[in-house]
Image (cartoon, helix red, strand yellow):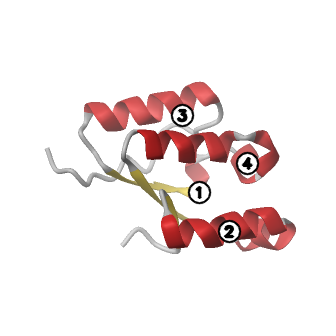
Amino acid sequence: MDATAPLAHHAPMIETRDDIIDLIGNAAFSEARDLVMAKDDFAPAFWDLRSGLLGELAQKLVNYGLTLRLTGDFAHETAASNAFRDFVRESRRTGPIFFVDSPT
């Protein structure tokens, strides 16, 4: 199987820690190393760093040697939170989550 595989854009919304575990498990099962998902695939709580969900996702990606290209417009979230803006800026430099405008 190709080591770079986008996940289905119409995947169920990722809302909980269990959903994160399922996402990582599905990636490992399909032998994907680089995931591509849309902002809309995730519950709004992910973009509030206080929820811990985005941090947990990032840690699991690192632990399993995966990267995630996350597509979408995050202008509202970066304007509303300095912490989120800093997270996006650092992630764009170092990963494992790369915030991009389009999947290509």
Instruction: In the rendered view, tell whether residue 14 sits above or below residue 6.
Output: above
Contact, mark 3 vs mark 2 (Cβ under 8 Å):
no
Q: Secondary structure at mark 4?
A: helix
Instruction: In the rendered view, tell whether residue 16 sits above or below residue 92.
Output: above
Label 4, residues with CA under 10 Å away: few <14, some 14-19, many ≥20: few
Q: Amino acid at mark 3?
A: Ile
Task: Tell me which corner region of the image, top left, top right, bottom left or bottom right, holds residue 90.
Answer: bottom right
Q: Residue furthest top?
A: 18
Q: Position of residue 10 (x, y in %)?
A: 46, 45
Asked whether the viewer can see residue 70, the reply is: no
Contact, mark 1 vs mark 3 (Cβ under 8 Å):
no
Q: Amino acid at mark 1?
A: Lys
Q: Which residue is mark 4?
A: 44
Q: Which residue is mark 3?
A: 20
Q: Amino acid at mark 4?
A: Pro
Label 2, residues with CA under 10 Å away: few <14, some 14-19, many ≥20: some
Q: Secondary structure at mark 3?
A: helix
| Residue at x 46%, y 46% (from the top left corner) | 62
Distance between the alpha carbons at the discs numbered 4 and 1: 9 Å
Contact, mark 1 vs mark 2 (Cβ under 8 Å):
yes
Q: Secondary structure at mark 1?
A: helix
Task: Tell me which corner region of the image, top left, top right, bottom left or bottom right, holds residue 50.
Answer: top right
The N terminus - image quarter:
top left
Q: Nearer the viewer, mark 3 or mark 2?
A: 3
Q: Which residue is mark 2?
A: 74
| Residue at x 48%, y 56% (from the top left corner) | 96
Q: Which residue is mark 1?
A: 39
